[in-house]
Image: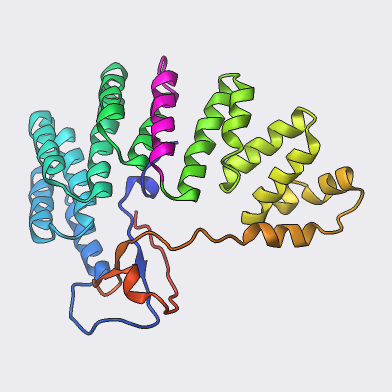
């Protein structure tokens, strides 16, 4: 499993259909931009493909899709054997990028390519990034990758810890702690894993791992709490996790279970962090512009 900000290593965006508040300004549709990018990336001849991708980047340097274009261009140059140009191009893009997540995507692409070619060099690069970088998701992804490399567990632990400390969103922190706790469990450090996973129950993976651990250790009431947290955000898992049977075994019956599940689904983390995104018509919008309005948001991850 290779983690990325978005599925299949592709750049994902919040591409939203908004119920109200849309501007009348004409913009280039994000769907058309995606078609343009995919057309450029499908050119058979590597040299022509690279040229088309460079043109796309030059024409859309302020759009997040440029990150995926850089990724495709970088891989094209590597596949063509032009490693020096590939590395120079990506380093220049990283140096001038000011948007944290976009810069982190480019850094992660560089790290991934090194990891595929030479694990020892990748670990050295990751070690330097663990001190120099402060974007939590980048550290999280690197931590996951190096955790499976021989001798990489200590570095992974440093990345996970730093990422969790930097994460400002409860769910993001819980996701990071889920993978950190899973690694500790895999290493046989069950007591530490249990402690870490206790802070990860708002993320389904963390809740499930903790629940299974506690049940195995005979801590059934605490395990049941974690199973409830797990099923609350993964409704289809109720049957899979045999929650009703486990609940009856501990409590005698399932009375109150439905109410607990509903209560566990409701939470308020306060005001959402500021975020900008593009809608299907290519308009760049800010969440704060719609404060007080109702939106229907579809998150689309192009691959």
Between 216 and 50, the residue placed more toward the observer is 216
Secondary structure that dominates the magenta span:
helix
Q: Quadrant of the N terminus?
A: top left
Indicate yes or no whether the magenta region holds residue 159. yes
Residue situated furthest right in the rendering: 252
Give the residue drawn at x 21%, y 65%. 33
Q: How is the image coloured?
A: rainbow
Give the residue drawn at x 76%, y 34%. 215
Indicate yes or no whether the magenta region holds residue 234. no
Write the start and end of the magenta stretch as one range: 147-167
In the picture shown, does residue 69 fall above or below 206? below
Give the residue drawn at x 12%, y 54%. 57
Give how far across and how far down residue 90 sits, in percent: 14, 39
Residue 214 figure quarter: top right
Residue 300 figure quarter: bottom left
* 133 left or right of 87 in image: right
Give how far across and how far down residue 165 sits, in percent: 42, 37
Give the residue drawn at x 9%, y 34%. 88
């Amino acid at each position: 499993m290779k983690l990325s900000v978005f599925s299949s290593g592709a750049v994902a965006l919040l591409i939203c259909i908004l119920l109200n508040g849309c501007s009348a300004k004409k913009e280039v549709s994000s769907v058309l931009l995606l078609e343009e990018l995919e057309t450029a990336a499908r050119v058979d001849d590597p040299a022509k493909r690279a040229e088309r991708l460079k043109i796309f980047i030059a024409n859309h340097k302020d759009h997040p899709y440029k990150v995926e274009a850089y990724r495709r261009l970088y891989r094209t140059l590597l596949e063509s054997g032009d490693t020096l140009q590939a590395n120079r191009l990506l380093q220049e893009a990283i140096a001038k990028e000011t948007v944290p997540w976009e810069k982190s995507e480019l850094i992660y692409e560089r790290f991934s390519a090194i990891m595929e070619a030479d694990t020892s060099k990748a670990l050295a690069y990751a070690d330097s990034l663990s001190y120099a970088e402060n974007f939590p998701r980048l550290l999280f992804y690197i931590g996951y990758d190096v955790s499976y490399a021989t001798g990489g567990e200590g570095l992974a632990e440093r990345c996970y810890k730093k990422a969790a400390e930097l994460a400002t969103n409860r769910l993001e922190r819980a996701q990071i702690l889920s993978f950190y706790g899973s690694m500790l469990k895999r290493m046989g450090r069950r007591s530490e894993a249990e402690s870490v996973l206790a802070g990860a129950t708002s993320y389904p993976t963390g809740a499930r791992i903790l629940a299974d651990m506690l049940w195995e250790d005979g801590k059934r009431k605490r395990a049941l709490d974690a199973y409830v947290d797990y099923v609350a955000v993964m409704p289809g898992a109720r049957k899979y996790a045999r929650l009703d049977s486990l609940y009856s075994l501990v409590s005698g019956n399932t009375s109150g279970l439905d109410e607990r599940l509903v209560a566990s689904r409701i939470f308020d983390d306060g005001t959402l962090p500021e975020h900008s995104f593009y809608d299907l018509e290519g308009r760049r919008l800010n969440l704060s512009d719609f404060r007080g309005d109702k939106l229907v948001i579809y998150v689309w991850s192009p691959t």
